[in-house]
């Protein structure tokens, strides 16, 4: 029960932090975009849609990477399902936001999928590198323990 | 040498050596008694063998039979894994899966895997997998 409450709090905190983080960066990028392309106005409805997009993205991320709903998946499983689910969500959202229109060309979709696959592989590579570091930590702890047992 | 056994004392088994002075004989006797607990009877080809626990790499349960593995040999023992858990020192022998108890002093390295298990490489190069259920116990033992 206590564990469930902790997970619920964690989910809430991650949701709040995620929305704040993404909204901040959205504003920074929008300001930069408007400055570069000399755009004087931003449509409120577009900003509202972007906010909903952000909230949905954060919820998908938290759904898969916190243990509130999914308790026993490994990092690789979570990442794989996240990438799959988020790709679909992102594509649909981009159509809704007007960033995508029509069916698109094969090359465009290939680029889109390539970006997702590249990001996925980068995440796996970072995680594997982290695992190597943990291998050293675990083995050192083992050696220390074995030394203590010998005494 | 006079040997006395006093029964019905509600304390853990202890051996007291009374001597005039501590010489090589007494030290040898003490070492012999200390090493007595660290042995286990196993069986190979119908022959009973006394195995020193420090030589055991791991115990494995297969088809309701329990086997112990040393560097050179594989022998069968009569105990079940849960019985071994009670007999063996839990500081040296750790349950790592439903069918394995490993001698932690015989592990050469540990490598956390992407699927939340830990791969243990033994001193003879053999690989054993510490299952997800038992990873927290191992981590607690090693203070990680």
Image (cartoon, coloured by chain):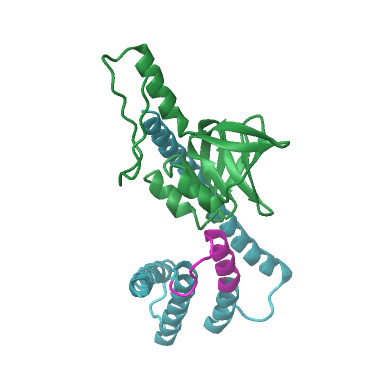
Residue ID at (55%, 75%): A90
**Relative to A84, A66 lies left or right:** left
Displayed quadrant of residue B50? top right
Q: Where is residue A123 in the image (x, y as percent from the top left)?
A: 53, 55
In which quadrant of the rendered view does residue A67 lie? bottom left
Display colour for chain B: green
Q: Among all residues in the image, which is located at the extreme top?
A: B24
Badge count = 0
Locate residue B119, reporting x and y percent: 56, 45
Indicate whether residue A72 is drawn in magenta: yes
| Residue for point 52% across, 37% down | B109
Left or right? Give the position of A30 relative to B130: left
What colour is chain A? cyan
Q: Residue furthest left?
A: B20
Nearer to us in this view, B19 or A95: B19
Horizontal side, residue B11 vs residue A41: left or right: left
* Residue range of the region highlighted in magenta in the rendering: A68-86
Quadrant location of the C terminus of chain A?
top left
Residue drawn 55% across the image and 50% down it:
B81
- Tell me: B102 left or right of B24: right
């Amino acid at each position: 029960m206590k564990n469930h409450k902790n997970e619920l709090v964690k989910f809430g905190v991650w949701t709040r932090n995620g929305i704040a983080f993404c909204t901040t960066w959205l504003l920074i990028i929008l300001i930069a975009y408007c400055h570069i392309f000399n755009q004087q106005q931003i449509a409120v409805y577009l900003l509202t849609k972007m906010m909903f997009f952000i909230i949905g993205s954060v919820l998908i991320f938290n759904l898969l990477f916190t243990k509130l709903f999914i308790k026993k998946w490994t990092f690789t499983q979570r990442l794989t399902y996240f990438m799959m689910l988020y790709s679909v969500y992102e594509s649909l959202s981009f159509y809704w936001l007007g960033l995508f229109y029509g069916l698109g060309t094969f090359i465009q979709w290939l680029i889109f999928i390539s970006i997702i696959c590249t990001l996925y592989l980068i995440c796996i590579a970072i995680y594997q590198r982290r695992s190597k570091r943990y291998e050293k930590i675990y083995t050192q702890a083992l050696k220390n323990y074995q030394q203590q047992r010998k005494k | 040498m006079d040997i006395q056994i006093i029964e019905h004392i509600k304390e853990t088994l202890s051996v007291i050596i009374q001597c005039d002075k501590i010489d090589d004989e007494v030290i040898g006797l003490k070492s012999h008694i200390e090493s007595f607990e660290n042995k286990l009877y196993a069986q190979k080809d119908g022959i009973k063998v006394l195995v020193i626990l420090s030589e055991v790499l791991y115990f494995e349960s297969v088809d309701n039979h329990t086997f112990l593995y040393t560097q050179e040999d594989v022998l069968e023992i009569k105990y079940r894994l849960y019985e071994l858990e009670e007999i063996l020192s839990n500081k040296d022998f750790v349950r790592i899966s439903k069918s394995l108890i490993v001698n932690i002093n015989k592990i050469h390295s540990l490598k956390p895997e992407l699927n939340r298990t830990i791969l243990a490489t033994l001193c003879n190069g053999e690989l054993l997998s510490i299952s997800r259920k038992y990873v927290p116990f191992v981590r607690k033992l090693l203070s990680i």
